[in-house]
Image (cartoon, helix red, strand yellow):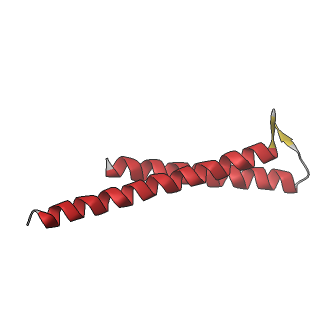
Amino acid sequence: MNALLLLLGRAAGLGGLLLCIVAGAARLSGHYYMGNFQLTTLLQAGTAAVVMGCFFLLLALTARDKDDRSARSSE
């Protein structure tokens, strides 16, 4: 479960970062739309993906901490 949360967090964060970079670069080059989407919408989607990745990584950290505490309390 921890490995899956880490993978999801890293993938969501990397995807969001790439989406933000692409949207920002396109906007700086003077475009307002990419395909049928406004670039600010893509930037917000990238930011949301980064936040979602942070939550997945936070879940992985707290799950690891709970596992460590339960292993220590049984000793």
Query: Residue at point 27% right, 59% down?
Result: 66
Which picture quadrant has residue 24?
bottom right
Residue 14 can be seen, yes or no: no
Q: Where in the figure is residue 55, as x and y percent of width and height?
A: 49, 54
Residue 2 as seen in the image, left or right of residue 35? left
Question: Quick one: which residue is furthest to the top in this view?
Answer: 36
Q: Where does the image place residue 48, in percent across and percent down from the top left?
A: 63, 49
Residue beneath the point at 32% across and 56% down: 63
Q: Position of residue 28 (x, y in %)?
A: 86, 57
Please indicate, yes or no, whether residue 67 appears anywhere in the rendered image: yes
Location of the C terminus (image quadrant): bottom left
The mark tally for this picture is 0
Q: Splitting the image into 4 quarters, where does residue 50 fall? A: bottom right
Picture coordinates of residue 72, whole percent (x, y) = 15, 67
In the shown orientation, is residue 23 left or right of residue 74? Answer: right
Q: Judge by depth and name the residue closer to the eye, 67 or 4.
A: 67
Residue drawn where x is 40% and y is 49% of the image: 5
**Residue at point 44% right, 58% down?**
58
Q: Is residue 36 left or right of residue 1?
A: right
In the displayed image of the protein, which residue is found farthest to the front?
A: 73
Q: Nearer the viewer, residue 75 or 38?
A: 75
* 5 left or right, relative to 19: left
Q: Nearer the viewer, residue 31 or 38?
A: 38
Residue 45 lies in quadrant: top right
Residue at the far left in the pictured view? 75
